[in-house]
Amino acid sequence: MGDEVKLFGMWASPYSRRVELALKLKGIPYEYIEEDLSNKSPSLLKYNPIHKKVPVLVHNQKPVAESLVILEYLDETWETHPFLPQHPYERAKARFWAKFIDEKLFPTVAKLRHMAGKEKEEAIEEAQQQLKIMEDELKGKQYFTGQRMGYLDIAANVLIWFRVVGELIGETVLTAEKFPLICEWIEKLMQIDAVNENKVPFR
């Protein structure tokens, strides 16, 4: 069928990169539209009037917002390279941990850029405690979703961004000594062309 797929995103947004990765893994042709978040386009405001942010997927003129929602929409609409586990319990777990990443782990690391001194030290400790939880989730697995890259791996792809944060703040949050399984998982992901193409770049 003649699907028209557009993605409104921003180069430094790991959430936009997450959706781009999903589109590439599924082999879905799409048009990417870069947004200037300091001067949002009328199209972005039209398609996401509630949150007014990226990413927004527009499929045949129908908008879908929020990256995790978009991942599920893509998985339900295109059968190639299924993301979510087949078993209901495993699907529920994947959704739970994806929400943990977006609501707990990622915000903790993101705020480090604006901290200093003791406050930053405490935030780094908090982030590493949360990373330890994700490290434990990888025990005995090739990927977070199991033996094959799936929904939670795409959601957790933002962990690659933590290295960028480390460069910006002059602190190493994610180390191979403390988190060997996560670092091995990142190296495994970086061997996948679609992942390597969609890592957050430096500018």
Image: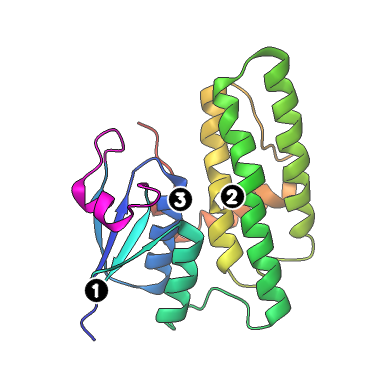
Q: Residue at x 52, y 41 (%)?
A: 161
Place of residue 94 in the rendered image (x, y in percent of width and height, measured from the top left): 66, 66
Q: Nearer the viewer, residue 173 or 126?
A: 126
Determine the CA span between mark 1 and mark 3: 21 Å
SS of the residue under disc 3: helix
Label 2 secondary element: helix
Would you place residue 117 above or below residue 140 in this image? above
**Residue 176 figure quarter:** top right
Is residue 143 among what the camera can see?
no
Given residues 103 and 25, the one toward you in this image is 103
Residue range (magenta) = 36-53
Give amino acid for label 1: Asn
Q: CA distance from mark 2 to mark 3?
A: 9 Å
Tell me where residue 105 appears, x and y as whole percent: 65, 43
Q: Which residue is mark 2?
A: 102
Task: Quote the CA–CA distance across marks 1 and 2.
Answer: 28 Å
